[in-house]
Image (cartoon, grey):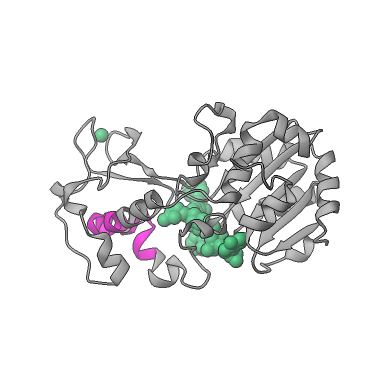
Amino acid sequence: MSSDYAAFRAALQQAKHILVLAGAGLSAASGIPTFRGAGGLWRNFDVTRLATPEAFKESPSRVWQFYHYRREVARAAKPNPAHRAIALLSSSAEELKRVAPSALTFQLITQNIDNLSNRALPNDAPRLALPIEMHGNLFRVKCTKCGFAEMNFESPICEALTGTEASFKNGEPEREIELKYLPKCRQCGSLTRPGVVWFGEEVEHLDDIDNKVEKQCDFIMVVGTSSQVMPAGIFADIVRNNRGKVAVFNIELTRADKLKDFIFLGPCEETLVKALDVEGRLD
Ligand code: BV8
Ligand code: ZN
């Protein structure tokens, strides 16, 4: 196991199919609270009362207030240098060639729903540069009846949610919002839900991810994730079992890190930028 940047870069020169698996730590420097670390989101809120289909069924009002709060936090946040380093290699063939001359593919798979990796991309980025958002996106809404889904960046997404983020910020008792005032489907008028993957729901793009992780990847960077949530938590092990290289970028050691080839302990907004040798190249 090494934390030697030169050795990392030398190994990256040989890589053909590169994956980045990102978690909440990628967005920490942008002010988005992580889940399990100090001040973590789940520490303050009971995940089962908020991020499950049962929670939404029991109280769509409470769950919508939770996601409205997180939409507003994400909207006010900005991509940080780690988002921009990944976006650069995802969208610029020459930048990718410079650090990984043998690379045929470079793909971000993110567990984050904050939309910051999309915002870090240049406006004219090719479709292939887009991240695989395996847990969905805060700014997507999905109809509970007809399945219609679309991106919705309105702030607030509906009048009744105005100012409710304060109750999450200051721990005030949440409001009880009547169903008829919650966000509605533009197509059929039924109740919509946040377009995210809740616990107990299947993650998105699983076939594509399985193919990339199982059959192709020979080099994975695991950035800012505690690797506690499945199935994302086992991708690095799969790549390792297929004799691929694994590099971890985290501020602390997580489970089974000893299996990894490279560990860079520190804030990924610094370590990842240095490892990918893109300092000074992020506009
Ligand atoms: C599924 C969207 C099956 C919503 C999320 C037992 C009981 C019940 C269920 C299970 C169980 N065991 C396993 C499961 C399955 C469950 C699961 O894994 N549970 C865990 C908690 C045990 N998984 C699921 O339910 C998944 N679905 O299994 O479906 C199925 C199959 C077929 C058909 C139907 C169903 C779905 C999981 C998706 C859940 N949705 N998010 C929302 O966000 O509200 S998960 C949520 O956790 C976020 O997406 C988050 O990204 C993700 C993972 O957490 P991390 O990203 O790792 O964040 P964390 O805070 O933990 O760690 C941050 C890390 O960053 C830390 O290590 C920290 O040190 C580091 N860091 C901090 N700052 C920095 C940094 N690193 C570098 N630089 C920094 N600056
Ligand atoms: Zn509908």
Q: In which quarter of the image is residue 153?
A: top left
Residue at 69% from the left image edge and 57% from the top image edge: 271
Where is residue 269? Give x, y as percent: 61, 55
Magenta-colored segment: predominant secondary structure: helix
Read off the magenta span. Answer: 48-65
Q: Is residue 242 left or right of residue 61?
A: right
Residue at 50% from the left image edge and 39% from the top image edge: 118
Where is residue 190? Give x, y as percent: 21, 39
Q: Can residue 227 be seen in this view?
A: no
Where is residue 207? Give x, y as percent: 59, 37
Q: Quadrant of residue 103?
A: top right
Q: Is residue 263 left or right of residue 161?
A: right
Q: Nearer the viewer, residue 251 or 278?
A: 278
Q: Quadrant of residue 237?
A: bottom right
Task: Confirm whether the magenta stretch covers residue 80.
Answer: no
Q: Nearer the viewer, residue 184 or 271?
A: 271
Residue at 25% from the left image edge and 54% from the top image edge: 60
Residue at 48% from the left image edge and 46% from the top image edge: 116
Where is residue 244? Give x, y as percent: 80, 46
Instruction: Check the picture and name the quadrant holding the N terminus.
Output: bottom right
Q: Nearer the viewer, residue 146 or 253?
A: 253
Task: Confirm whether the magenta stretch covers residue 56.
Answer: yes
In this rendering, the answer to whether 104 lies above or below 171 is: above
Q: Is residue 32 left or right of residue 185?
A: right
Instruction: Check the picture and name the quadrant holding the C terminus.
Output: top right
Q: Is residue 132 visible?
A: yes
